[in-house]
Amino acid sequence: MPGPKDLDPSSSPRALLGAELRHAREKAGLSQEELGQRLFVSGSFIGQLEAGTRRMQPEHARMLDEVLGTEDFFQRNCAAVAKSKYPEHFAEAAEAEASAAEIRQYAPLLIPGLLQTPAYTQAVCRAYQPTAPQAVIDELVANRMDRVRILDDPTEPMLWVVLDEAALRRATGGAAVMAESLQHITALVRRNRVIVQVLPFEAGAHSAMEGAIKLMDFKQAPPLAYFEGVGAGRLEDDPATVRHQRHTFDLLAACALSPEKSLAVLEGMAQDYVHEDHP
C-alpha cells in the first residue's frame, strides 16, 4: 500500500478533507486497511480519499464520523467536495483524471474528451441534448475545454489513446469539424504530447469489443478503472478488475497500428475530410 501523500490543505476542499481524514485515522491508531474494513471498503479506497483522488460520499462521511469519533466533521464538510461542474456520473472521474500521472484509454465510438476540439464537443453535446438551450451547450463545451487544459503541462499526465477506426469514420459535426479534430490530434502527437494508435477495421475481433476502457495511474495512490455508459459511470479500484482492464488494453494496443503508422493514417484521413469539405 503506497504511503499517504503530503497534501496542501489550501489547494482544494477535497485536499483538506483528505488531510483531515489521514490525521484522524492516524490519531485513532488505524491503518488504511483497518479503517476500510470498518467502512466495508478497501484500504485502497481509504488511501484514495486521503490522496484526494476519490470523492467522499455522504454515507462514507457519516461512517467516518462514527468510527473516528469526529462528531459530524466529515458530514458537514463533504458537501463542499461534492460540488462539481461536471455531470454527477462523471464528476468523480473528471476529478481523478486531473490528478492522474498516466491515462490509458480505448475510444470505440468517439474521440475522447481530452483530445476533442470545441467544435467537436459542440456537435457531441448537441447530439446528446438536441433540445437544450444554446447557453447550456456552451457551458458544457466550456467545461470540457477546461478538462483539456491538463494537456497544457508538457509532460503530465502521460496520455495513451487507442482510437477505433469507427470513431474516426463517424463524421461528427461534418467534414470540416472532423478535419480540424484529426489535425488537432496529429499536432499533439507530433509535439510528443500524446501517444495515439489507430485500431483499424481490418484488425477484426479484439479484446475490447464490449466497450470503452479508461485506466488512470497516480504517483501516490492505487490505480483506477472507469466504466461508462449512457448517462452512467463508476470508478473501480478493485485490483483484480483494474489488472484485467490493463491486460485488455495491452492486448488491444498490440492489435492496433504502431504510433508511426497511426500518425500517417490520421493525417491521411484529415486530408480526406478537408477534400470532402472543399471538393
Image (cartoon, rainbow, N blue to C red):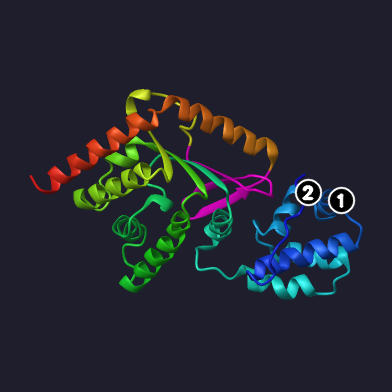
The number of numbered discs placed on residues in the rendered structure image is: 2
Specify whether residue 229 is painted magenta: yes
Q: Looking at the image, which residue is at 57% across and 59% down?
A: 95
Task: Report the side of 192 relative to 24 (left or right).
Answer: left
**Image coordinates for residue 37, horizontal then vertical, percent:** 84, 50
Screen quadrant of the N terminus: top right
Q: In the image, which residues are magenta?
A: 211-237
- Amino acid type at image mark 1: Glu
Q: Residue at x 65, y 57 (%)?
A: 54
The local crowd at label 1, few if under 14, some if 14 to 19, many if 20 or more residues have their Cα within 10 Å, is some
User: Residue 154, position in %: x, y?
Assistant: 46, 52
Check whether the beta carbons of the residues at disc 1 and disc 2 lie within 8 A of each other: yes
Residue furthest toward the right?
Answer: 29
Along the viewing direction, whichever of 7 and 77 lies nearer the viewer? 7
* Residue 185 tag number: none
What's the mark number on residue 43? 2
Q: Quadrant of the C terminus?
A: top left
Q: Label 2: few (<14), some or many (≥20) within 10 Å?
A: some
Relative height, residue 259 to residue 212 (above, below): above
Q: Which element is circle 2 on?
A: helix
Q: Which residue is mark 1?
A: 34
Residue 73 in percent (x, y) is at: 79, 74
Q: Nearer the viewer, residue 137 or 98?
A: 98
Answer whether residue 231 is magenta in the image: yes
Nearest the eye: 253 or 59 = 253
Which of 4 and 214 lies nearest the eye of the viewer?
Answer: 4
Whichever of callouts 1 and 2 sits on the residue coming sooner in the sequence is 1
How far separated are the C-alphas under marks 1 and 2?
7 Å
Residue type indicated by callout 2: Gly
Horizontal placement of 265 versus 192: left or right? left
